[in-house]
Amino acid sequence: MHNFIHSQLFILTFTIGVYVVSLWTYRKTKLMLLHPLLTSLLVIIAGIKAADIPYQEYAEATKIIDFMLGISVVALGYLLYEQMTHMKGNITAMVTAIFVGSVVGIVSVILIAKALGADPRIIASLEPKSITTPIAVTVCAHSGGIPALTAIVVILVGVFGAVIGPFILKKLGIESKLARGLALGSAAHAVGTARAMELGAVEGAISGLAIGLMGVITAVMVPVIEAIMRFFE
């Protein structure tokens, strides 16, 4: 039994099964707090801890999922291609909005963290909170942060943005599909994009674009903003 539980087949099946059940539960209940990313994450962590499966062993068994993530990015690109007509004449506004959002997000988290007396390593870990995990972890490492903490924060920000984002946009009376897609993708990365796709094809496509632009701009602006803020200290 021990060998079976630690086999790659069991670990992969367990991971996919947990996600499928979590997704089914979410679609039935429509409760954002039961978002499949959050619930499956908690169940999988509890499962591998209970089975005493080392993380490296788990990562090796599920590496095919990492490979499939690359294919999903291509799928987002195709969806964006289909919605290109909605972007004509709006490129400058979109890039400007994401740039401003990136700068405000970085500066605000630095100021708030400093006001609360956070350690510089903690601050560096929080700076890339709104971009997708692979880029965020790299940015964090170059800034002297804690990659594991950054990964956790990114997930929490994504889930929070996906839960609260559509509600805030509705209350503010924002009906533009472009605006809603940009907001969810740039603030809540992949989880926000999954939520945006539920709102519509245009929102999903623009949100996918926002993930990439937000990642690139934030990766460039984090060291620049850090240097500027050190200069004025």
Image: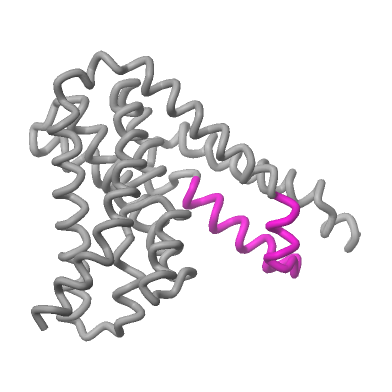
The magenta stretch spans residue 220: no
Colour setting: one colour
Percent position of residue 40, x then y: 55, 50
In front here: 74 or 155? 74
Q: Is residue 119 above or below residue 87?
A: below
In front here: 78 or 177? 78
The magenta stretch spans residue 47: yes
Quadrant for the N terminus in the image: bottom right
Report the predominant secondary structure element of the magenta stretch.
Answer: helix
Percent position of residue 51, x then y: 75, 65
The answer to which image quadrant residue 17 occupies is top right
The answer to which image quadrant residue 50 occupies is bottom right
Quadrant for the C terminus in the image: bottom left
In front here: 16 or 182? 182
Percent position of residue 90, x then y: 15, 25
Q: Residue at x 35, y 28 (%)?
A: 204
In front here: 140 or 114? 140
The answer to which image quadrant residue 168 occupies is top left
Q: Is residue 80 above or below residue 133?
A: above
Q: Residue at x 35, y 80 (%)?
A: 121
Q: How many marks?
A: 0
Q: Is residue 70 above or below residue 203?
A: below
Q: Is residue 219 above or below residue 170?
A: below
Q: Residue at x 69, y 63 (%)?
A: 48
Q: Residue at x 54, y 34 (%)?
A: 24
Percent position of residue 53, x then y: 74, 66
Q: Which residues are magenta?
A: 37-62
